Image (cartoon, rainbow, N blue to C red):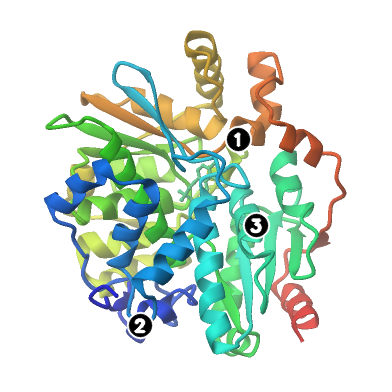
Amino acid sequence: MGKSINYISTRGDSDTLKFNDVIFEGLAADGGLYVPEKWPTLSDEQINSFEEKSYNEIAHDVISVFLDDSISSQDLTNIINHSYSTFTNPEITPLRKFDQNNYLLELFHGPTFAFKDVAMQFIGNIMNLYLSRKQRQINILGATSGDTGAAAIEGFKNIDNSNIFILHPYNKISEVQKKFMTTVKSENVYNIAIKGTFDDCQSIIKTIFSDIRFKKDNNLTAINSINWARIMCQTVYYFYAMSRLDSGNKSVMFSVPTGNFGDILAGYISMKMGLKISKLNIATNENDILTRTLNTGIHDLRDVKTTSSPSIDIQISSNFERLLFDITDDTELVRELMSKLNSNRQYELSKEIVRKMQDVFTSHSVSQDEVKEIIYNYYRDYNVVIDPHTAVGIKSAQKCEEEFDIKVFLATAHPAKFNDTVSEIIGNNDYIPLKVKSMMELDDYYVILENDVMMIKKFLEDKIK
Ligand SMILES: *Cc1c(COP(=O)(O)O)cnc(C)c1O
């Protein structure tokens, strides 16, 4: 199916792969990330036809251009239908209008109440198909700042021939986020709390995956947002949202609360594929490295600050490398920048690169007080309860000087996931669904380990053999 796109590494020194291999790869062997060699495009006609199609039908058309002939059109339809049958809203990612020109794109109707379910449900099912054909086993290893892990566990808890190991920063994710992961009781699920930050967890994963031998011996596969298939699945809801807006020639901006740059990169890719979005706003909290990069060209790592929007409390934004590569088309430069980041904790982009980024992106950072104000105002004015990440997206978009006819805010999590923050601001718990309330009473299953790669490796080996 599709024209069998080749996938290459952003650092130019890894094997070229087809989809059926790229889905099992995390980091490329040269340390880079896989991207399509060339962006597939959809015609205007095809994009216009989405107005008449369901989410699942749009997903089929968008995803099929990235696949190879290992997946038939019917396989793809089955996987998509199965994946999104776990969503509680018939529109899958409904677009909610709350005043003249402003919309929420609600991405939290999946099993773990955050946008990551959109990709993870699909990935669990498509990997299951490949694994059952090859009779092989895989071991998923991932790091989470809260939401990825839960979504991945939900995606894989029923998949035969798989184990899933998820690292999260001990005591640095919300209680509800934790419960979504640690209350899943399944033989193949391992939750590991690391005494450190999310960046520490991510760095452990990177180190383990760079040990090619260990990775191979243990059949390790990544599913954090460096996995290409996640980005691919997320492009779908940009097409879906545009098809539900009567946008004509109107200018449309999407505002995306951004951490690892996966979600917003999917928006960028949808533009490359032919979707007419005017601007993408990189919404950041007080961890504003990407805002500073876009405004000054200087990308410098600072310490991670803990905020009320923990899923974007990061400094190392892995998928930004994919954008750097796409904008520069220069693997040597990407390698040089990444090596500088590694050794000097910073790099600087040329004015030309920054200008190219500014053609597509804007970026504004939002303080925790502003998050509170937005959550409160939206509740008061529209009777809409939003989560702190969504609030970052809204406030950040409000700071854009450029005018747009339509603004779409990605609602990346259900407010119940961050109820500590939200309830205190709006003064009630009425928005918390029963599912979450009863989950809070269940037992947790997790181990606590030191921030130490050797210990984690040993743990994996013990469980995998
Ligand atoms: C993961 C996450 C984000 C950030 O998405 P990236 O793809 O990492 O930029 C934003 N909001 C919520 C609720 C998330 O779970």
The residue indicated by pointer 3 is 154
At a point 66% along the width and 26% down the height, the residue shown is 421
Q: Amino acid at mark 1?
A: Thr
Locate residue 398, reporting x and y percent. 35, 22
Distance from the alpha carbon under mark 3 to that under mark 1: 26 Å
Return the residue at label 1: 307
Closest to the observer: 133 or 368?
133
> Quadrant location of the N terminus?
bottom left
Nearer mark to the viewer, of 3 and 1: 3
Give the answer, above or below, for where 278 lies relative to 274. Answer: above
| In the image: residue 326, left or right of residue 31 | left
User: Which residue matches tag 2?
Assistant: 17
The amino acid type, in three-letter code, at marker 3 is: Glu
* Image height of 195 relative to 68, above or below: above
Near mark 2 (Cα within 10 A), the count class, few <14, some 14-19 or many ≥20, is some
Secondary structure state at the residue bearing disc 2: loop
Mark 3 or 2, nearer chain start: 2
Name above or below for residue 321 compared with residue 416: below
User: Residue 86: x, y in percent?
Assistant: 58, 50
Query: Could you tell me residue 170's position as x and y percent?
Result: 75, 52
For residue 446, the mark is none
For discs 2 and 1, the disc positioned in front in the rendered view: 2
Residue 160 horizontal side relative to residue 298, left or right: right
